Amino acid sequence: MNSEARHGIVVDRRLTGGGAKGTSGAYTVQDDEDQRYYGFDYRQIVTEGFRTIRIGESVRFHVSVEGPGRAEFVIRLDQPDPSEYYT
């Protein structure tokens, strides 16, 4: 598997019990092209802001060379309105 950029939709999020409040998430993205599923967690999300993603969001990612079922360098393509987080 090469490391070209892929596009997909986040289809699942499960709490893993990590993080400061025990609510870190493990995510699953489905590749638009080949329909395969890839897992990742908040550490793979590339962002200047919140390290969270919602189910249904479009992302760009690379398939990990170290683990072919893992996504890395995940970038959100649907940036939310910051006011959603500060109401």
Image: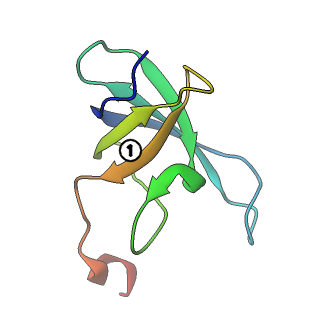
Image color mode: rainbow
Residue 6 against residue 53 in the figure, above or below? above
Relative to residue 39, is residue 35 drawn left or right?
left
**Amino acid type, label 1:** Ile
Residue 9 against residue 50 in the figure, above or below? above
Image coords of residue 56 (percent x, y): 31, 42
Q: Residue shown at 47%/54% (left/top)?
A: 45
Q: Residues within 10 Å of mark 1 (few under 14, many from 20)?
A: few
Relative to residue 76, is residue 24 drawn left or right?
right
Image coords of residue 18 (percent x, y): 76, 57
Q: Quadrant of residue 20?
A: bottom right
What quarter of the picture does the C terminus occupy? bottom left
Q: Residue shown at 38%/87% (left/top)?
A: 86
Image coords of residue 57 (percent x, y): 29, 46
Residue 65 against residue 10 in the figure, above or below? above
Image coords of residue 74 (percent x, y): 41, 47
Q: Quadrant of residue 9?
A: top left
What quarter of the picture does the N terminus occupy? top left
Name the residue carrying label 1: 55
Q: Choose between 84 and 33: the one closer to the eye.
A: 33
Q: Residue shown at 49%/64% (left/top)?
A: 51
Q: Residue shown at 53%/50% (left/top)?
A: 44
Q: Quadrant of residue 49?
A: bottom left
Tell me the element at label 1.
Answer: loop
Relative to residue 73, is residue 19 drawn left or right?
right
Relative to residue 51, is residue 15 drawn left or right?
right
